[in-house]
Amino acid sequence: MKPRVVEGDLLDQDVEVIVNAWNRNIIPWWLLLPQGVSGAIKRKAGIEPFKEVGKHGPIPLGGAVFTSAGKLPFKGIIHVAGINIWWRANDVSIRSATQNALRIARELGILSLAFPIIGAGSGGFDEQAALDIMLDAMTRIESSVQTTVVRFRKRSR
């Protein structure tokens, strides 16, 4: 199924599950100050999904884990480790995180999934390049999961 690219807010998407561009879980979740997508998720979902992801221990770079959605109206959140210990993304971490999130969605029977652009925020990767890597990774996986990639809508001042 061909992925859609939309502009907007990840938390406003009409999907079953969302993807959180997270870190490798080396630093305990309660010591981190989530920013960007993770910060928005924490503000609206509460801390329960972050406690759950912390129980998984360190996530390999490019890896993914599933948790509940806390107070959010989704069936769950797939947290992907798209950035390394130095808070930087690369083409391998973006591609692997995308593929592993889709693998988990397929294994769990999820029908629809929304991604932020992995690595383009805190990861310092060029947004268009990250999007291109994600779209390429999505087309290389056989999946019936309806996928949406959300470009963050920049608010005008």
Image: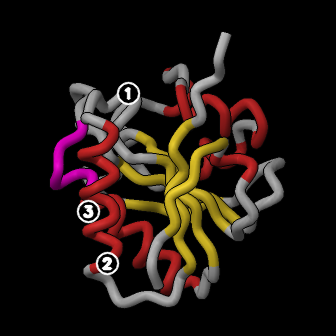
Q: Nearer the viewer, mark 2 or mark 3?
A: 2
Residue positioned 53% across, 71% down in the render: 147
Residue type at tag 1: Ser
Residue positioned 47% across, 71% down in the render: 3
Q: Main secondary structure of the magenta part?
A: helix
Residue positioned 51% across, 21% down in the render: 31
In contact (CB < 8 Å): disc 1 and disc 3: no
The residue segment tinted magenta is 89-94
Residue type at tag 3: Ser
Res. 96 mark = 3
Res. 26 mark = none
Q: Which residue is mark 2?
A: 139
Q: Relative to the observer, which residue lies in front, 146 or 73?
A: 146
- The quadrant where residue 64 appears: bottom left
Q: Is residue 68 above or below residue 23?
A: below
Q: Is residue 20 magenta?
A: no
- The CA distance from mark 2 to mark 3 is 13 Å
